[in-house]
Amino acid sequence: MIFRETVPARVTRVAFLGLWLVITLFPLYWITVTSLKAPGDIFSQPLTYWPTALTLENYAGLFAQSDFGVFVANSLLVSLVGATVATLISLLSGYVLARFEFRSKGVLLAAFFVTQMVPSFIALGPLYLMMTKLGLVDSRLGLILVYIGICIPFCTVMLRGFFANVPDALEEAAMIDGCSRLGALFRVIVPVMMPGIIASFIFNFVNCWNELFLSVTLINSTENQTIPTAINGFISSFNVEWGPMAAAAVLTVVPTMLLFAVASRWIVQGLTAGAVKG
């Protein structure tokens, strides 16, 4: 039996999706418009939904009054290194969990799931004490290590689902032809799983790029600050610099939007592949 959508149902669906799209995009539109307004026009009355005169004053002031280029470089370094290392470690751990049976496997998986339910601020005290003893407070290396530890549990569970969807016969055939287990993994399985690996890397990168709470706690000096920490600095006890903060927010969102736009095909393939069997 073929279900045919009626005209009222189609109109309702399109109207609902259109309304949802407007609600979703309006905050991004509003912060972009705010960044293009002159500082004196941001709270002008009556409220305008489009600036009477477009200006890049907030963007120019952002780079002139702060080391925003340094913040961008720090965020790129921390996010790229953290996401790459976390994805590589999770690739190996996800493979072990998908292909081998051992006594503590269920406990380990449960621990990975539980860590995703615990707010990060609960572990802030012990974490800060440990980083202090290691001399890694106010250090980009310390922040990278923390981000790697945060990303590994979720990424491991995610990649385990992808490995479980790849037939064992592929690596067994490669090992019969002379490959070691690691050789079969990287020469045969990894190319097949590339969409899932790319999806996992992008999620890790975005998590590191947008993280604020730990970076504010562990980073003190300006030269080591990441973008979220720098944006938080525009809020003081008596004033909020809306113009530069909106400009910084727009520049922060653009890289992740471009990343998702370029890699959307691999993300969809990776998520659907990992959802089939887990």
Image: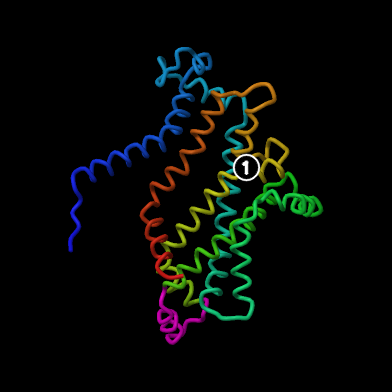
Q: Residue at x 52, y 28 (%)?
A: 246
Position of 16 with respect to 145 (left or right) is: left
Q: Position of residue 106 (x, y in %)?
A: 60, 74
Q: Amino acid at mark 1?
A: Leu
Depth check, front residue: 257 or 117: 117
Q: Position of residue 184 (x, y in %)?
A: 47, 77
Q: Is residue 235 above or below residue 193?
A: above
Residue extent of the magenta highlight: 166-182
Q: Is residue 19 above or below residue 4?
A: above
Position of 53 with respect to 136 (left or right) is: left
Position of 98 with respect to 149 (left or right) is: left
Name the residue beneath numbered marker 1: 212
Q: Is residue 166 above or below residue 129?
A: below
Q: Considering the whole magenta stretch, tell me its main secondary structure.
A: helix
Q: Residue at x 51, y 80 (%)?
A: 181
Q: Position of residue 73 (x, y in %)?
A: 58, 41
Q: Residue at x 56, y 81 (%)?
A: 101
What secondary structure is marked by label 1?
Answer: loop
Depth check, front residue: 78 or 272: 272
| Quadrant of the rendering where the N terminus is positioned | bottom left
Q: Residue at x 42, y 72 (%)?
A: 165
- Count of number-bearing discs: 1
Q: Position of residue 168 (x, y in %)?
A: 43, 80
Depth check, front residue: 206 or 28: 28
Specify the color scheme. rainbow
Quarter of the image for residue 213 reads top right
Q: Is residue 203 magenta?
A: no
- Graded by Cα atoms within 10 Å as few (under 14), some (14 to 19) or many (20 or more), the crowding at tag 1 reads some
